[in-house]
Image (cartoon, grey):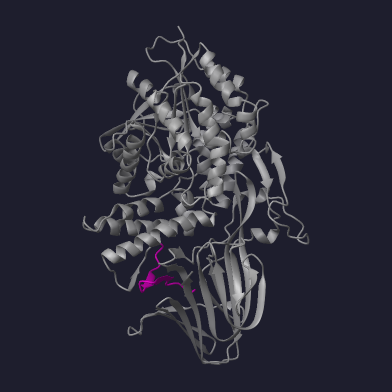
Amino acid sequence: MSRPVSLLFGVHAHQPIGNFPEVLADAHTRCYKPFLEVLFRYPEFHFAVHFSGWLLDYLFAHFPQDMAMLTEMVRRGQVELFGAGETEPVLAAIPARDRIGQIETFSIKLAAKFGQRPSGAWLTERVWDSTVVPALTACGIRYVIVDDYHFLCTGKTTEQLNGFFTTEEDACRLDIFPISEALRYKLPFSPASDAITHIESLAVENASDQPVAAIYFDDIEKFGIWPETYQWVYEKGWLEQFVQGVLSSPGITPRHYRDYHAAGKTKGIVYLPTTSYIEMNEWTLPAESARVYADLVKQSKASGGFERNKAFLRGGIWKNFLTRYPESNWMHKRMLCLSARLAALPKNPHTGEMQQKLYAAQANDAYWHGLFGGLYLPHLRRAIYNNLIDLEAMLDHCAARENRATQDIDFDGIDETCLQNGNLQIIVRHDQSASIIEFDAYELKHNFGDTLRRHKEDYFDKVQLCDQHSPDDAADSHSVEKSGDADNSVETSNGIASAHDRIISRHRIYAVDLEPDDNARTLFIDRINGARIAYQYSDADTATSGIRFQAWHESLLINKQLQLLDNRLQVTYHFSGDLKNSFSTEINLAMPSCDGPGGRFILQGEAISGFGQPLALVNLNEITLDDDTLQGSILLKASLPVQFSAQPLFTVSQSEQGFEKIMQAVTLLLTWPIESREVTLSLTVRSQ
């Protein structure tokens, strides 16, 4: 006899640390609030939910009535809470001690706020790596959920994936539920009746004591925040229709994961490969490799064998983002260094605030890029650095470090030297650029070197370029949408298209916007007669408190020295030999206001331009970059008049909202003829 299908329905809610308040408010209005309100009316509809720790705190502080509603649903047994890392880290990317700390911190929070300690856990971006098993089990987690794709990669078939399996690592047991890809694409994009019919069809004739499970766990943002979904899910009643249809169906029983798990038995042992969901694996690949992968997928679809072959047409793994984007790797390795310093502290100076800063710096969003990853978003990277720099200052207060230290921080085979004086810090890589890769102001908790170069992305082929002679109109002035892309289409059965199937240009994009940078966008990149200078690191003068480099250009000897003097970064050039040349230096500054109204150039006490507009000045000796978001400014001074130009640095990226241009930095170019043997440039950091 066939038995009712057990619907294990779960949603995951998360917002990145550092996201804009208006984004959070909109997410609450269009998703979190209406979702809870609908389900609150149906106590018999059992479901699971995971709110990330930071978002949960935000909702309790700003929307207590909705959290009271969720608390009541937990109390009456309607909701099962899922655990995770407190700040939504990719557990596989942080040290084991921090995995345990993150999971335990969040479990304690759930017990304190709701009276329920979780037995199940959400894995960030469904990134599976077997090394996380011991940390999960040490915190009392008994089961997790990952995609059915993870199981297909082991040779399992879709028909087998209707219950939970067991794995182990280092003799630690953990059970795993496979999320149905078919349900992920149907909910909520196909009509509710179609989704219910699909779930009912999963029932099979069997004599087993354990019913078949229809397993769903996915982002709650699909229920209101993705394009068109608010109207579809709430105004047109999709969610209400789905819940009513499930409850009225004799073939479906909504159940908690914990109840299904407690009453059932494992379907056997499984060892999953290191992987994530199939789209994520594609996003981890560099542009050229991603195109090869896409061609293989096209060929497989054309031959009709994609469903059979997709588990074996595999992309990369999540950690590939650290190799693909040096900016991500740099943040990650800086985080690892500070985690080690914090762990080495004696217990007394080790404070909860320091631990919280570390955990906040481990939040996943700014470390990767895909349809939903936030590496391209300056405000999310800024949140990472804000916490890293603040934590570093606290650690320095507890255990002072040397003012100068050299090591290979990012494991690229090239040493970096850190120079700090308690107010500022610069980090310089010992490469030929002799430029600054990180410039920290501790009082402002800001890294002025936090820029992102223009990377080559495989989706650039899909960008609809504008005529180079067209006016560059304001944001949102150019929007072209194309749904159901033939290369990535999903059958929606008269429903709506998901974010994966939309090609939208939100800004005017030109060919020049897509040209990748050859080098990192750092501070004080020097050129002579337009050609980059190849420096050699020099540590011969041990008496100086600065960092020195040296270069020859034909018969011209250039000595470059970088120093920190209180709240001022000073760069001094000394020229010997033939002085008949033109010299320039490029300074890329991450200013938080970007092209918004809060950033401005100030000349002789007057605001003359915003950071988002080109600016050219001659015979300049000093100019101020003032930033309301930063609540501080930088005063640029030159010891002789220079030709000055400023340009905004934009990158093009893809998100669920479409293709968009994002300002990463303001690029300053200072040019002067070499007529003096010594030239000094300085950046003085001030707080408001």
- 329 is higher (above) or lower (below) than 293: below
* Magenta stretch holds residue 406: no
Q: Nearer the viewer, residue 553 or 230?
A: 230
Q: Residue at x 44, y 59 (%)?
A: 385
Q: Can you give x and y, in whole percent of width and height, for residue 1 in the image?
A: 45, 6
Question: Measured along the vertical axis of the image, is residue 650 above or below residue 582?
Answer: above
Q: Nearer the viewer, residue 173 or 598?
A: 598
Q: Which residue is rendered at x = 63% and y = 24% of the image?
A: 191
Quadrant in the picture for residue 390: bottom left
Camera sees residue 152: yes
Residue 392 versus residue 483 in the image, above or below: below
Nearer to me, 188 or 574? 188
Where are the magenta residues, as a range? 411-433
Q: Is residue 109 left or right of residue 652?
A: left
Image position, residue 446 (x, y; %): 45, 64
- What residue is rendered at 47% in x and 13% in y? 4
